[in-house]
């Protein structure tokens, strides 16, 4: 396992985290050496139509992003055939799971993807030396931040990786729990956060008293609850689905939802005394 020095690995290391398991670092592990990780470019999907008698084509519908892949390359040293079979069994246990595995590399420590390892073959360079590559399918098409908005404010000394240039974070403190009145929420993603159109994850938790109306003044999207909340209530808008104390309550709302544009979003929260907490992962190309 690679050694951490001031929060950073000395060499580029692959980090795997299967669902509900501890993150596992691969670098000089039992003769297994991680070489590099190559992530394919974004996969745009566009539909064009032709019109008779008119040059060219016209775009039909939005530009979408399809699933992509990533390939991790390795070098493996073994002692003999028994050691080789043992290490193959170890590798299969590390890479193959029934659920998505979180994958990141220390050269881009603050971002990750959630992938599924595909079958791979091991090439025999010599009796003791092998190479292989593991390709991952990335169904979501995105890279994600390791931290979420709900992790802010962040202690930089304990989490130095949030200083990564790849997160688009501004040089100021961010807080995703705000009080009634006017406030700003920052979305550092490469995309607008769109729970309805793109099924992006966005959880907004309202805790307090009153009949809350939350409006994103930059996008015009709003959400309001028509009944009275009391101090012991918790109202959560999960994407486009509202829940009061864990029970669906859309019938008591304006059937609205919230979109976060890239960058700063100016909000107003009225008719209500309490807090609004925004919880979402940052998403990247």
Image (cartoon, rainbow, N blue to C red):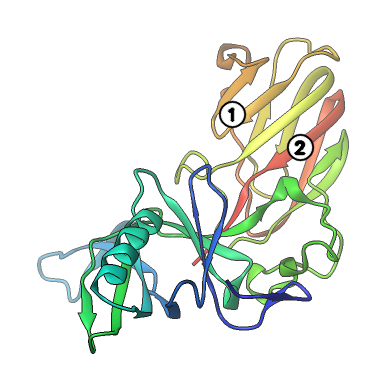
Residue 54 locus on image (x, y percent): 16, 72
Q: Is residue 228 visible?
A: yes
Q: Judge by depth and name the residue closer to the eye, 158 or 196.
A: 158
Q: Secondary structure at mark 2?
A: strand
Between residues 170 and 145, which one lies in front from this camera angle?
Answer: 145
**Residue underneath mark 2:** 277
Question: Foreground residue, 132 or 57?
Answer: 132
Q: What residue is pinned by disc 1?
A: 256
Asked if residue 212 is positioned above or below residue 89 in the image, the reply reads above
Q: Position of residue 40 (x, y in %)?
A: 37, 74
Q: Is residue 193 above or below residue 119?
A: above
Q: Are marks 2 and 1 in contact (CB under 8 Å)?
A: no
Q: Is residue 281 left or right of residue 227?
A: left
Crowdedness near tag 2: few (<14), some (14–19) or many (≥20) residues, C-alpha within 10 Å: some
Q: Quadrant of the N terminus?
A: bottom right
- At label 1, counting other C-alpha atoms closer than 10 Å, the crowd grade (few under 14, some 14-19, many 20 or more) is some
The mark nearer the N terminus, 2 or 1, is: 1
Helix, strand or loop at disc 1? loop
Residue 63: give x, y in percent of width and height.
36, 61
Q: For the image shown, how many numbered marks are present on the structure?
A: 2
Which residue is at a point 30% across and 75% down the rendered structure image? Answer: 133
Between marks 2 and 1, how big is the CA–CA gap? 17 Å
């Amino acid at each position: 396992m690679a050694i951490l020095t001031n929060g950073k690995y000395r060499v580029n290391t692959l980090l795997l985290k299967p669902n509900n398991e501890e993150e596992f670092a691969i670098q000089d592990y039992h003769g297994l050496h991680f070489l590099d990780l190559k992530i394919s470019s974004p996969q745009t999907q566009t539909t064009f139509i032709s019109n008779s008698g008119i040059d060219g084509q016209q775009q039909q519908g939005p530009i979408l992003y399809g699933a992509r892949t990533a390939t991790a390359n390795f070098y493996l040293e073994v002692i003999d055939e028994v050691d080789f079979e043992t290490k193959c069994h170890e590798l299969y246990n590390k890479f193959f799971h029934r659920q998505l595995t979180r994958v990141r590399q220390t050269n881009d420590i603050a971002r990750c993807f959630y992938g599924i390892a595909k079958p791979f073959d091991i090439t025999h360079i010599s009796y003791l030396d092998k190479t292989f590559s593991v390709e991952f399918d990335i169904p979501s098409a995105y890279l994600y931040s390791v931290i979420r908005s709900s992790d802010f404010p962040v202690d930089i000394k304990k989490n130095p990786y949030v200083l990564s240039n790849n997160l688009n974070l501004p040089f100021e403190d961010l807080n995703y729990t705000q009080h009634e009145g006017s406030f700003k929420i920052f979305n550092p993603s490469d995309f607008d956060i769109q729970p309805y159109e793109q099924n992006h994850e966005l959880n907004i938790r309202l805790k307090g008293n009153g009949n809350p109306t939350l409006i994103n003044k930059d996008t015009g999207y709003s959400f309001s609850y028509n009944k009275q909340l009391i101090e012991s209530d918790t109202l959560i808008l999960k994407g486009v689905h509202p829940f009061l104390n864990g029970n669906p309550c859309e019938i008591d709302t304006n059937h609205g939802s919230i979109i976060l544009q890239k960058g700063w979003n100016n909000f107003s929260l009225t008719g209500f005394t309490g807090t609004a907490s925004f919880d979402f992962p940052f998403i990247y190309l």
